[in-house]
Image: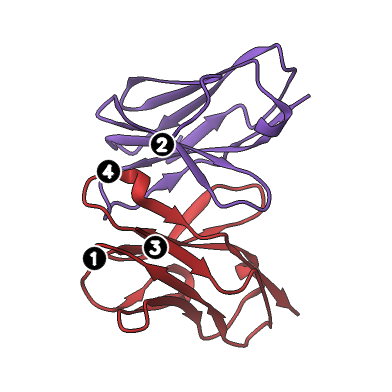
């Protein structure tokens, strides 16, 4: 069975400080892992994905995530937050070779940026 | 138009109405998806089409009826909905069907059932 847990429902940081959004997963198969971002009244946009290649994945807008199998984690980080990063972030685990229904979305983390 | 588009962006309908949501992808993808996004709940996958065939139906009530006439278009036909069906309905597409394919999402249709 697959599951994904986003450990914080809301994270608030000051502009220019680092961002850490935490995600833990469980999976019966070797998973693919994704981070998506959703700005207000918009659809989801892919930030980055892991599919069993390099464990440190770089995405758009300066975000990156590290796959740690021993910790079953896939935390999202950014060295310096920008006001435009304020949005909802979703961690997603996909762990079945031929079934989209095994795609599991986390409940989301709302990121707020303080000026 | 680029990416994934959805129309209408907002829809208000009564419980006895019949309406349809439309999704179009301009990416040359082979798989398309309908999701329901409700407040305080994770995204719920509703239907998946791969190469125009429905490959997944996740226990969705029959008042929701999908249609995929070709690989670029996806519809969600709605009839006799309930107030709890009010939500943001998101369409997505991917190049293929399987765990490693990222999905590209449309902006969604905000549905309110009165």
Q: Is residue B108 above or below residue B112?
A: below
Left or right of B48? Residue A40 is: right
Report the mark closest to the observer, 4 or 3. Answer: 3
Name the residue located 26 percent from the left edge and 53 percent from the top edge.
A96
Say if labels 1 and 3 share a chain: yes
Q: Tell me the residue that label 1 is attached to.
A: A30
Q: Residue A34 carries which label?
A: 3
SS at mark 4?
loop
Q: Which mark is residue B76?
A: none
Gap between marks 1 and 4 measured at Cα: 21 Å
Q: Colour of chain A?
A: red
Q: Colour of chain B?
A: purple
SS at mark 2?
strand
Q: Residue B95 carries which label?
A: 4
Say if labels 2 and 1 share a chain: no
Gap between marks 1 and 3 measured at Cα: 13 Å
């Amino acid at each position: 069975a697959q599951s994904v847990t986003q450990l914080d429902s809301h994270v608030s940081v000051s502009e220019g400080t680092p961002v850490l959004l935490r995600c833990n997963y469980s999976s019966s198969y070797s998973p693919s892992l994704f981070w998506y971002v959703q700005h207000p009244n918009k659809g989801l946009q892919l930030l980055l994905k892991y599919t069993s290649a390099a464990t440190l994945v770089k995405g758009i807008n300066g975000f990156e995530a590290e796959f740690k199998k021993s910790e079953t984690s896939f935390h999202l980080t950014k060295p310096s937050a920008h006001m435009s990063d304020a949005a909802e972030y979703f961690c997603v685990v996909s762990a079945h070779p031929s079934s989209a229904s095994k795609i599991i979305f986390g409940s989301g983390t709302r990121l707020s940026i303080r000026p | 138009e680029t990416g994934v588009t959805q129309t209408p962006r907002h829809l208000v309908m009564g419980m006895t109405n019949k309406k349809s949501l439309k999704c179009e992808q301009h990416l040359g993808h082979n798989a398309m998806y309908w999701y329901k996004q409700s407040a305080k709940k994770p995204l719920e996958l509703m239907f998946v089409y791969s190469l125009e065939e429905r490959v997944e139906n996740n226990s969705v009530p029959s008042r929701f009826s999908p249609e995929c006439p070709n690989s670029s278009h996806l519809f969600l036909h709605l009839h006799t909905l309930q107030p709890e069906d009010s939500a943001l309905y998101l369409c997505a597409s991917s190049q293929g069907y399987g765990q490693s394919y990222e999905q590209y999402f449309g902006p969604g249709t905000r549905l309110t059932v009165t």
